[in-house]
Every structure is written in structure tokens, then in C-alpha cells.
Amino acid sequence: MAKSPDVKLAVFGRAGVGKSALVVRFLTKRFIWEYDPTLESTYRHQANIDDEVVSMEILDTAGQEDTLQKEGHMRWGDGFVIVYDITDRGSFEEVAPLRGLLEEVKKPKNVPLVLVGNKADLEHARQVGTEEGERLAAEMACAFYECSACADEGGCVAEAFHELCREVRRRRAVQGKARRRSSTTHVKQAINKMLTKISS
Ligand SMILES: Nc1nc2c(ncn2[C@@H]2O[C@H](COP(=O)(O)OP(=O)(O)OP(=O)(O)O)[C@@H](O)[C@H]2O)c(=O)[nH]1
């Protein structure tokens, strides 16, 4: 049986923002102009991040899926890339509701997340300013990248995925510590109870 991945990442965003193009860019370092727009796909990938091999499963969701499908995919994932298209203001306006649904589905809050403004090569058609993306990411307390799946010279796309993996691991480490702390507290309480019983 195949080993389960260290992290499961799902990519969300309005239809046509370039989710598939970003995933394909990350996996193959190439840009492919047209993809089947309706299909969702999952991919397995391994990457060396900060000198550690991380195995991941990436779900490229279909932009047209309904709320029920979205919720299922949100439950499945450990970390999320929310993508908008800098040339499509409507896609930017869909980010906050997506984030809201994520917070509803994934309790507790503070879900590992990165925000990507895609199609940065289309500067002439820009409808969403860089500072607007930065502001929204600050509100959502997540990292922000303006990338181009088509012309990704700086490795922005890989950096966004890697940062998301780091974020998933950071949150797990914090949760692990909190769990250990609470089990230590339970042991201390049990010992105290025993000592009280013995002494009375
Ligand atoms: N110029 C430019 N075009 C892009 C970029 N990324 C994607 N595209 C184009 O945008 C269109 C949509 O890209 P997809 O990757 O299919 O978008 P998607 O979000 O997966 O769409 P759905 O599967 O319908 O949800 C395609 O024609 C891509 O070639 C980019 O960075 N720059």
C-alpha cells in the first residue's frame, strides 16, 4: 500500500484563475496553455523543503464545484492555496467567502493557508492592486504571493507551495506541544489526587 502523504494540499479559486496551471507549473516547472476546465485532479509529489523530504498530495479542485463538494475537499485537506486572478476582480471578491467557508468547516480556526494572485504577467489588464492582495492576506494572517504560472522566473509558485507545507508543519508542531502540555497536566492532576487520597 502507498505511504500516506505528509501533507494534503487543496487549491481553491474561481474557475479560470489558473489553479491547474499553477499546480502543473509546480509539479513540472512548465506551463501548459489549456487544461480540461471541469475536472478535479489529485497529484502526488515529493519536494525537498528546508533539507527535509516532504511528500504531498495536491488536489486541484474544479472552479465550478458546489458548496457541498467544496466542504468535502476542505475537510480532506491539511493546507489550502486560495487563488485569484489579478485581472479578474470578481475572483478576488470570492476569496473572503472561500476563507469563511474554510473556517466554518475546519474548526479550530487559523487554517494553514496561502493566498496567490495569479497571472502577474498580465500587468496591462490588472484589476486588483498588489497592495489589495497584501491587505487581504494580512487580514487572513497568511502569506501572499503574486505569481505567474505562465512566466514563473523567480520560482514564486514553488515558494508558495513550500511555504504552505511549512505552515502545515508549524501548526502541527504547535498543536503537538499543546497536546503534550495537556497530557502532562492530566498526569500531574492524577498524581495529586492519589497523594491527597493517601494523606487523608
Ligand atoms: N497569461 C496567463 N494565463 C494564464 C496563467 N495561468 C493560467 N492562465 C490561463 O488561464 C486559463 C485558465 O487556466 P486554468 O489553469 O485552466 O484555470 P483553473 O483555475 O484551473 O480553471 P477551472 O479548472 O475551470 O477551475 C487558461 O487559458 C490558462 O492558459 C498565467 O499565469 N498567465
Image (spheres, helix red, strand yellow):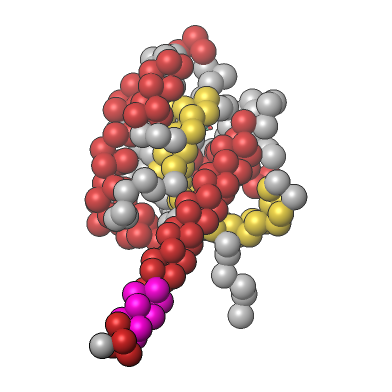
Residue sitting at x 70%, y 46%: 50
**Residue 64 image offset from top left, x and y in percent:** 32, 45
Furthest residue toward front: 199
Q: Nearer the viewer, residue 137 or 26?
A: 137
Instruction: Choose top left, top right, bottom left or bottom right for residue 90.
Output: top left
Q: Position of residue 131 (x, y in %)?
A: 43, 15
Apparent side of residue 146 relative to residue 26 in the rendered image (left or right): left
Report the side of 105 relative to 113 (left or right): left
**Residue 142 rendering spot, x and y as whole percentages:** 44, 35
Q: Quadrant of residue 76?
A: bottom left
* Magenta range: 187-195
Q: Image point 30% across, 41% down: which residue?
A: 98
Say which of 8 and 58 sits in front. 8
Q: Is residue 21 magenta?
A: no
Q: Where does the image place residue 54, in percent across and percent down from the top left?
A: 65, 56
Position of residue 8 in the picture relative to residue 61 (left or right): right
Left or right, residue 92 beside residue 143:
left
Q: Could you say which is closer to the camera, residue 187 or residue 31?
A: 187
Above-or-below relation of 9 to 32:
below
